Image (tube, rainbow, N blue to C red):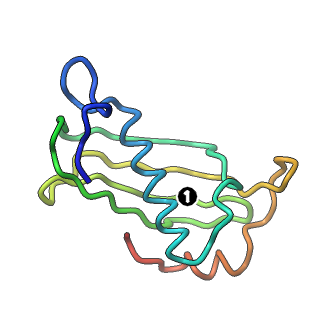
Amino acid sequence: MRVEFVDTDAGGRIHHTAALRWAERAEHQLLRSLGWSELTRFPRRRLEADFRAPLRFGDEVVVEIAASAVGRTSITYGWRVLRDGVSCVEGSTTCVHVDDDGLPRAVPEELRAALDGGPLT
């Protein structure tokens, strides 16, 4: 993908929220690739991001993501944003699987199995 103007701040670098949106998009692509369609049942519990190198409007980037831990009710993803093979942003996102009332529920076994050793996308 390419860094769009809307992703940047007044200084011409990406706004920090852009990397979080890209990671969420990659998460959804990963889940869809595994055949999982219930994308709204995973609110965020924890986000971390380390910005290692600047990204600017027009830069071409690749976002990689994989499940790094699957707990009873949560999934933690490790992700990174690369430009020309160099890691510019690294982060993690922990999501909690919830039911219709927003209460934590166990991660379904079929999703747990699909994420185990899942590929980077």
Question: Where in the figure is residue 71, as x and y percent of width and height?
Answer: 67, 64
In this picture, is 6 found above or below 32?
Answer: above
Q: For residue 42, what is the image quadrant?
A: bottom right
Determine whether, in the image, residue 76 is placed left or right of residue 52.
right
Determine whether, in the image, residue 86 is placed left or right of residue 4.
left
Give SS at disc 1: strand
Question: Where in the figure is residue 89, as x and y percent of width and height?
Answer: 29, 45
Residue furthest left in the image: 84
Residue furthest front in the image: 5
* Quadrant including the N terminus: bottom left
State the residue at coordinates (66%, 47%).
43
State the residue at coordinates (71%, 55%).
41
State the residue at coordinates (45%, 54%).
25
Q: Counting other residues with Cα less than 10 Å from the Cα at mark 1, is it few (<14), some (14-19), or many (20 or more)?
A: many
Reading the image, the residue beneath label 1 is: 76
* Quadrant including the C terminus: bottom left
Instruction: In this rendered view, identify the residue nearer to me: 46 or 21.
Output: 21
Residue furthest right in the image: 101
Question: Where in the figure is residue 28, as x and y percent of width and height?
Answer: 52, 60
In this picture, is 59 found above or below 74?
Answer: above
